[in-house]
Image (spheres, rainbow, N blue to C red):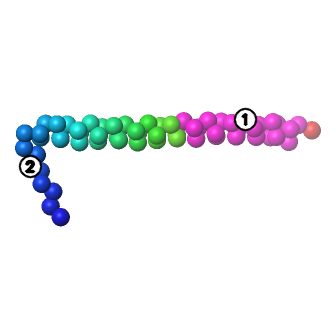
């Protein structure tokens, strides 16, 4: 299957739309990955906070 790259007088619009779409999709992927990392850190912090009293009570006589 061959893609026809000849967009004629609409080339600026077509390639601009492709470029904007690529930037937006890339931005969405990056934002999702950063958000996931943030929530992973938050979950780890909450888990450590939850486990801290259990560990403290084990060390006390």
Q: Residue 59, how many percent across, how many down? A: 85, 39
The residue closer to the viewer here, 56 or 40, is 40
In percent of the image, x 65 and y 36: which residue is there?
Answer: 45
- Which residue, as the protein is rendered here, is positioned at the far right? 61
In percent of the image, x 18 and y 41: which residue is there?
Answer: 14
**Structural crowding at the residue carrying mark 2, measured as other residues with C-alpha within 10 Å and reported as few (<14), some (14–19) or many (≥20):** few
Magenta stretch: dominant secondary structure: helix
Q: Say whether residue 15 is left or right of residue 45.
A: left
Query: Magenta segment range?
Result: 38-60
- Pointer 2 with pointer 1, Cβ within 8 A: no
Nearer the camera: disc 2 or disc 1: 2
According to the image, label 2 marks what residue?
6
Q: Is residue 59 located in the magenta-colored stretch of the structure?
A: yes
Instruction: Please tell me whether mark 1 sits on a helix, a strand or a loop.
Output: helix
- Numbered tag placed on residue 49 in the rendering: 1
Instruction: Please tell me whether mark 2 sits on a helix, a strand or a loop.
Output: loop
Q: Residue 2, how many percent across, how many down? A: 15, 61
The residue closer to the viewer here, 50 or 19, is 19
Q: CA distance from mark 2 to mark 1?
A: 60 Å
The residue closer to the viewer here, 42 or 17, is 17
Within the image, what quadrant is residue 20 found in?
top left
Q: Is residue 16 above or below residue 1?
A: above
Mark toward the start of the polypeptide (2 vs 1): 2
Q: Is residue 16 located in the magenta-colored stretch of the structure?
A: no
Q: Residue 27, how many percent across, how many down? A: 37, 37
- Which residue, as the protein is rendered here, is positioned at the far bottom? 1
Q: Is residue 2 above or below residue 38?
A: below
In percent of the image, x 58 and y 41: which residue is there?
Answer: 40
**Structural crowding at the residue carrying mark 1, measured as other residues with C-alpha within 10 Å and reported as few (<14), some (14–19) or many (≥20):** few
Q: Residue 41, how many percent across, how many down? A: 58, 37
């Amino acid at each position: 299957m061959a893609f026809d790259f000849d967009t004629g007088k609409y080339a600026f619009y077509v390639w601009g739309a492709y470029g904007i779409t690529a930037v937006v999709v890339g931005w969405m992927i990056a934002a999702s990955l950063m958000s996931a990392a943030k929530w992973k850190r938050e979950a780890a912090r909450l888990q450590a906070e939850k486990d801290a009293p259990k560990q403290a009570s084990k060390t006390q006589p």
